[in-house]
Image (cartoon, grey):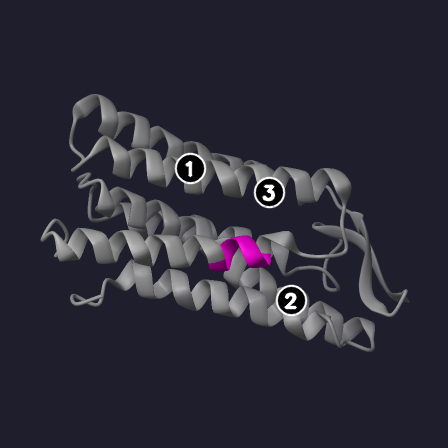
Amino acid sequence: DRKRDIWLLSLFVSIAVCNLGYFIISFADNLEFALFANRIAYLGNVFLPFFMLLIIMNLLRLKYPSYLPLILIALNSVMLLITISGGFLPIYYKEVAFEIIEGIPTLIKEYGPLHITYKFYLFAYFGAMVGVIIHSTIKKTLVSNKHAAFLAFLVISNIVIWLIENIIEASFEFMSVSYIVTECLILFLYAILQDYGLHD
């Protein structure tokens, strides 16, 4: 990106951190190490939708108050503290154990009272992303309806994959692959917009 867009760079770092956590979990051999890796994954996961939202708002040329990112960062930090509390406090995971199931290191979790907040957190961000896309389409602030449709496809695809992953409770983290595909497609969109001089 010629202008070194801070939010695009942050998204790439966030996905790398998230997938690093998933990777480390794959060769964990005890509970403490697996929880450490899980915290790394959440560090990337918690901030990822925040970066996605700001990228979408910038691509759609939506104006927002300068204090909005600061407020969201504060909320994200609170969510991060809740999600990494496993092993310390029984608020996100009431109990957590480590097992190797069919050769796969696995955290066996009993969810605590604040675990549901993460789902609300993600739905709020996904809803905000869809909301700004609809708003931009109605207000015609975007360069092209095709760009809005492209971004909507990315957001909805991630929502669907996340829902499927939660419903089937698979041992494989499908979102880790989805994140990589999403960032590549966003980078592709940036490249197109820059080639046509539509994004500085």
Label whose residue precedes the other's in the sequence (1 or 2): 2
> Viewer-nearest of labels 1 and 2?
1
Q: Which residues are magenta?
A: 176-180
Q: Residue at x 64, y 66 (%)?
A: 22
x and y percentages locating residue 24 in the rendered image: 67, 75
x and y percentages locating residue 117 in the rendered image: 60, 40
The amino acid type of the residue labelled 3 equals Ile
Quarter of the figure with the C terminus? bottom left
Is there a contact, CB below 8 Å, between mark 1 and mark 2? Answer: no
The answer to if 178 sits in the magenta stretch is yes
- Determine which quarter of the picture holds residue 134: top left
Residue occupied by mark 3: 161
Residue occupied by mark 2: 22
Secondary structure at badge 2 equals: helix
Mark 1 residue crowding within 10 angstroms, few (<14) / some (14–19) / many (20+) = few
- Determine which quarter of the picture holds residue 140: top left
x and y percentages locating residue 66 in the rendered image: 20, 48
> Viewer-nearest of labels 2 and 3?
3
On the question of residue 31 being in view, the answer is yes
Can you say whether 2 is above or below 164 in the image?
below
Residue occupied by mark 1: 153
Label whose residue precedes the other's in the sequence (2 or 3): 2
Residue closer to the observer: 152 or 95: 152
